Image: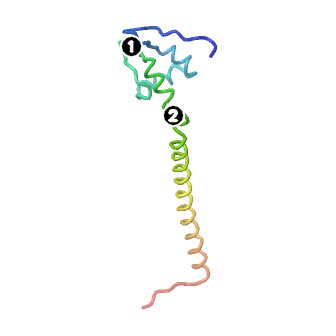
Amino acid sequence: MNKKIIPKKIMRGMKFFNVPDLTEILGLAPLAVRDYLRKGKIKAVKIGKRWWVSDKNLNAFLNAGAIFDKPDKVILDTISEGVKNIIEEREEKLKKELTEVFLKQLSEKYTITKKQ
């Protein structure tokens, strides 16, 4: 983005951006931006038919996923927790698959009959 976006409104010293501003800043289609606003992914106010997003709320949205802005320990703990969860999920899936294969092989090798 080479061009600086100038907010369309400044109220009480706060800058506010409208949907066309956000489409340019975020590189999204207007419908996508409005969808984010309706779903509350970006905090905004709607006055009449127009949405307005403060620079504070826009920055909060843009930095929401910025894990790498956090201390190293938090980053490492988050990554470790994610890896641990992935390993546990795969381990559970592998156990189920191995159990199915083992039971299938057993049932093919041995005929199990009920005692009467």
Dots 2, 1 in contact, CB < 8 A: no
Q: Quadrant of residue 27?
A: top right
| Amino acid type of the residue tagged 1 in the rendering | Lys
> In what element is the residue under mark 1?
loop
Q: Is residue 79 left or right of residue 34?
A: right
Residue, x 54% and y 42% (percent of image)?
A: 75
**Residue 107 tag number:** none
Residue at 51% from the left image edge and 19% from the top image edge: 30
The residue that mark 2 highlights is 65
Name the residue rendered at 37%, 18% in the picture.
Answer: 45
How busy is the neighbourhood of tag 2: few (under 14 within 10 Å), some, or many (20 plus)? Answer: few
How many marks the image carries: the answer is 2
Quarter where residue 103 is shown: bottom right
Tell which of 7 and 101 is nearer to you. 7
Front in this rendered view, residue 62 or 46 = 62
Note whether 26 is above or below 105 in the view shown: above
CA–CA distance in space, label 2 to label 1: 29 Å
What residue does disc 1 label? 49
